[in-house]
Image (cartoon, coloured by chain):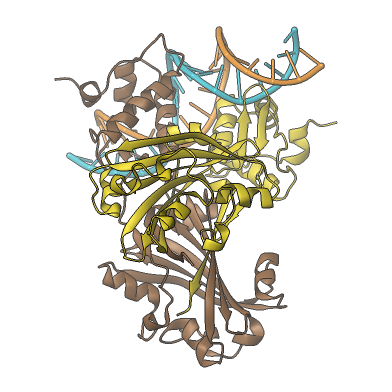
Chain colours: A yellow, B brown, C cyan, D orange
Amino acid sequence: MPPLASGLLGALDPTSDRAVFRQIADQLREAIDKQRFREGDKLPSETELVEHFGVSRMTVRNAFSLLQGEGLAVSEHGKGVFVRPRPPVRRLASDRFARRHRDQGKSAFTVEAEAAGSRPEVDGLEVKEERPSQDIAARLGSPRKVLARRRRYLLDGRPVEFATSYLPLDLARNTPIAEPNPGPGGIYARLEEMGHRLDHFEEEIRARMPSPTEVRTLHLASGVPVIHLVRTAFNTDGRAVEVCDTVMAADAYVLAYQLPAT
Amino acid sequence: MPPLASGLLGALDPTSDRAVFRQIADQLREAIDKQRFREGDKLPSETELVEHFGVSRMTVRNAFSLLQGEGLAVSEHGKGVFVRPRPPVRRLASDRFARRHRDQGKSAFTVEAEAAGSRPEVDGLEVKEERPSQDIAARLGSPRKVLARRRRYLLDGRPVEFATSYLPLDLARNTPIAEPNPGPGGIYARLEEMGHRLDHFEEEIRARMPSPTEVRTLHLASGVPVIHLVRTAFNTDGRAVEVCDTVMAADAYVLAYQLPAT
DNA sequence: CAGTGGTCTAGACCACTGC
DNA sequence: CAGTGGTCTAGACCACTGT
């Protein structure tokens, strides 16, 4: 009765140029790809692999470290190293800000999450007046000060994104937009009531590894990038009336867009 | 005359709970954020840091490993560890497939890159008939076979993306689309000539860490994710006539989209 | 308690770079 | 050649998990 590792893993090739820890990672990666280990399964412990391959512990840890960097494995102190579970993904459609989605009493995030059978939460709401960063100022037409609305979004208890909306202060001060709860339809509905009929949005998307702060805020496993989305809302006069800066856990989202063939 | 490390880095806090290698990483990260080390600068060598902090070499290497995972540093064997340079970013606009961009003799990639002052190349072109994967088949209406057009794109010698276009074989066989060079305006122009007037595109965007194959193909530094983009082209009958599966080096791109406020 | 991963040491030898 | 990072060993002690 061979231990777990022996049953599913082979031997090293001592003639290979490939570093031993890479060979070990290769074997584990292949076993994961072939579903011999499935999502959430525990991988062999460091001790088991040390004995199976006859290497030192650091070599095994280097192999695990590679897999974690690739997003294939996560370690849990005192428990083991596991195949990283793939959580359900939230699909953001490009019509999510269409006016017809704005006539309910709840936010777009809440409505959409409940429709998908998830439990949405909003967290750490904070509304402040600030001096804008250079980037935000440039996008908003260089206002001296802005209203910043920060919040974090969770699905079924898991943080998935946090966002800050910036509006020129002269436009937002002493309006419902400056209240913690801006009311049904959110700030876009309020902007339109105030005469800023929205014409279109521009979104810019980047992907990168998270900062330590982002890792904490979103409880990110290692090997999980973030999607950085900056959305600018334009009114029918062509003025940028809001910029929303969003950082999303990349493993929780698919973004979907429609492009005209023109 | 203190060595480089002493001049820019402080001391450890032995009373802190924070692991020593994390404290070292914190100091280097802060120095990078504050531009005390700039893009492309060499960080202190492992030996220097070992002496400066009075720790063992593995501890210093762990600190560097953290920074590399965050995409802040890259190591070069025999040379040193450097602040990761931020290469110029290519902006993909959402009108990049508009018909008006299709009347030149060159591909969209080539035209756009030259306009931006870069030197574009296309690489490893391969045209094959294949059985589609389950995902591709589902998107194309379950054809038994597809034509697959693979290629890699480079800017100024640097690989930035590789892509595969899939078309139902009954639609593409024995047409210019099956030729290595499909002619001016690319396969979209040919599809329209063949009566498939394009109506719109759908794009799905994900971000994740690259597989080892993708690391090789795109020469990715560690700590650089990929953007995975799947575009489906629909004709005016609502039929999906092409799916293009693209993997991009995330540090080389910003994707930009316009959304109607409807 | 035993088993797990997290941190750290003090060496060793190798491969690559630049002078 | 000296200096750099890449790999590997054989220990040690700690913190966290589950029984």
Left or right of residue B203, residue B258 in this image: left
A89 vs A14: above or below: below
Res. A258 in view: yes
Camera-side residue of C12 and A88: A88
Residue A100 on image: x %, y %: 56, 62
Camera-side residue of A214 and B27: A214
Report the residue at 59% width, 49% height from top. Answer: A105
Left or right of residue B39, residue A100 in this image: right
C17 vs B56: above or below: below
Residue B203 on image: x %, y %: 53, 66
Camera-side residue of D19 and A126: A126
Count numbered badges in the picture. 0
Residue sitting farthest toward the left: B1
Q: Quadrant of residue A132?
A: top left
Residue A40 on image: x %, y %: 71, 38
Res. B219 in view: no
Report the residue at 51% width, 85% height from top. Answer: B179
Report the residue at 39% width, 21% height from top. Answer: B23
Q: Quadrant of residue B20?
A: top left
Quadrant of the image for the C terminus of chain A?
bottom left
Residue A185 on image: x %, y %: 52, 52
Left or right of residue A82, residue B118 in this image: left
Left or right of residue A35, residue B178 in this image: left
Quadrant of the image for the N terminus of chain A?
top right
Q: Quadrant of residue A4?
A: top right
Camera-side residue of B191 and A213: A213
A49 vs B173: above or below: above
Report the residue at 57% width, 82% height from top. Answer: B235
